[in-house]
Image (cartoon, rainbow, N blue to C red):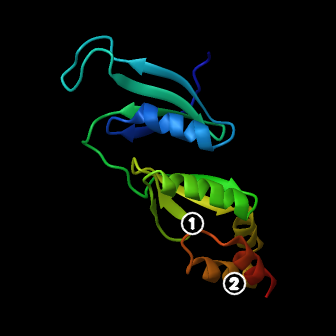
Amino acid sequence: MAIAKNTICVWYDKDAEEAANFYAKIFPDSSVNAVHRAPSDYPSGKKGDVLVADFTVAGVACIGLNGGSAFKQSEAFSFQIATDDQEETDRYWNAIVGNGGRESACGWCKDKWGVNWQITPRTLTEAMAAGGDEAKRAFEAMMDMTKIDVAAIDAARRR
């Protein structure tokens, strides 16, 4: 298997393999490609501990690094997943939040490992790209939302 030229590395305390398996279950074009274990004992772990999970999320190559508790996730990094309708938006949102995650604002949520996700319906992205009053109305509607309501964004676009 060829190694990708550019790969996103996501830092986990100790659950990179569990996270990779979860993402592979809920997102299309996602998989766990390899799990690399420590060949010997090391200062913070034992031989056989998972060091790195090589995975793909929605077609994007990623590495989950079990780096310990030194660094925490923040909203400075997020995965943005484009959705086609409310059903798809709800499916991803509910999977993340329902698996120990937390809701945030404006289509953002956080999984149980602290990784941030933007579950963004295409209608919102299209409204922002349209600019002008349409973008303003959609933006203002979004600002009052937690999970994005596709029908409310569509209604705001039409006003």
Q: What residue type is labelled 1?
A: Gly
Label 2 or label 1, whichever lies nearer to me, is 1
Q: Quadrant of the C terminus?
A: bottom right
In the rendered structure, the answer to whether residue 100 lies left or right of residue 4 reads: left
In the displayed image of the protein, which residue is found farthest to the top? 39
**Residue occupying image coordinates x 63% and y 53%:** 81
Q: Which amino acid does label 2 sit on?
A: Arg
Q: Looking at the picture, how far across and down is residue 91, in whole percent?
A: 64, 55
In the rendered structure, the answer to whether residue 75 lies left or right of residue 27 reads: left
What residue did someone put label 1 on?
A: 107
Answer whether residue 96 is visible to the viewer in this image. Answer: yes
Q: Residue 137 carries which label?
A: 2
Q: Looking at the picture, how far across and down is residue 152, in whole percent?
A: 70, 79
Q: How crowded is mark 2: few (under 14 residues within 10 Å), some or many (20 or more)?
A: many
Q: Looking at the picture, how far across and down is residue 84, in whole percent?
A: 76, 58
Q: Looking at the picture, how far across and down is residue 44, in whole percent?
A: 20, 26
In the displayed image of the protein, which residue is found farthest to the left? 43
Answer whether residue 8 is visible to the viewer in this image. Answer: no
Report, in whole angstroms, how far the alpha carbon at label 2 lies from the one at label 1: 16 Å
**Residue occupying image coordinates x 52% and y 53%:** 96
The answer to whether the residues at label 2 and label 1 have Cβ atoms under 8 Å apart is no
Among the two numbered marks 2 and 1 on one chain, the one whose residue lies closer to the N terminus: 1
